[in-house]
Image (cartoon, rainbow, N blue to C red):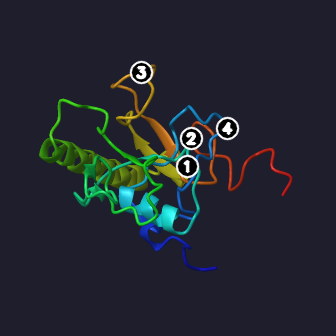
Amino acid sequence: CSQSDVPRCAVQWGFELPFPPCQVWTADRDDRRDFPPSCDCLVGCHNANHRTEYAKNCVNTTGHWLERADGRLEQHAWRDAFSDGQWIKQAYASDVSLNETSRYERNLQLAARLEADGAESRRRGLCSGHGISTGPLPWSPGSLTAAARFCHCFPGWFGLQCEVGPGYPTSPV
């Protein structure tokens, strides 16, 4: 129990996570303030069957693409051995104006931003030490402005400053 059951998720953006970010933990699943996983992490969730459809957005840090059984490449960041992982969506996948190289470059820029924001969050003790303070992600709803910075909490932590946890506040356990 001292190790993550999804090793690819054990460390994300410089944080050691208590739980893998395989599913949406926030009270409002459309809020999109959950901790942003890398696509490799989400693949680990898929392989361990620790997932729900709601945690589908990720940051492609490897440049790998999904190869389907028919040999076509999809805009996903991994090989899908089960042919059912098309719910995983790398950042900027919906931007049809980007080619694969440009999309990957944008993902790497996003990963660099998350690494830098993670370092700043740790250094300054932001988000009660249980999350990353960063701006909206490419999959954030349009209601969140580009200038806004807010906490994306570790799995199992809640609140505007990730001050509640671990566990959901109304959980009977």
What residue would you read off at disc 3?
Answer: 142
Residue in view at x 25 percent, y 61 percent: 62
Q: Report the Cα–Cα distance between label 2 and label 4.
A: 14 Å
User: Which three-letter amino acid code belongs to the residue tagged 3?
Assistant: Gly
Tell which circle, 2 or 1, labels the residue nearer the N-terminal end: 1
Cβ atoms under marks 2 and 1 closer than 8 Å: yes
Q: How many marks?
A: 4
What residue would you read off at disc 2?
Answer: 161
Instruction: Pinpoint residue 2: horizontal percent, then vertical percent.
Output: 60, 80
Tell which circle, 3 or 1, labels the residue nearer the N-terminal end: 1
Residue in view at x 50 percent, y 62 percent: 46
What residue would you read off at disc 1?
Answer: 128
Mark 4 lies on a secondary structure that is loop
User: Which three-letter amino acid code belongs to the residue tagged 2?
Assistant: Gln
Q: Report the Cα–Cα distance between label 4 and label 3.
A: 19 Å
Mark 2 lies on a secondary structure that is loop
In this orientation, does residue 14 appear? no
For residue 27, the mark is 4
Q: Report the Cα–Cα distance between label 3 and label 2.
A: 21 Å
Instruction: Pinpoint residue 77: horizontal percent, then vertical percent.
Output: 31, 55
User: Which three-letter amino acid code belongs to the residue tagged 1?
Assistant: Ser
Q: Nearer the viewer, residue 26 or 77?
A: 77
Q: Badge 3 local density, few (<14 within 10 Å), some, or many (20+)?
A: few
Tell which circle, 2 or 4, labels the residue nearer the N-terminal end: 4
Mark 3 lies on a secondary structure that is loop
Q: Badge 2 local density, few (<14 within 10 Å), some, or many (20+)?
A: some
Cβ atoms under marks 3 and 1 closer than 8 Å: no
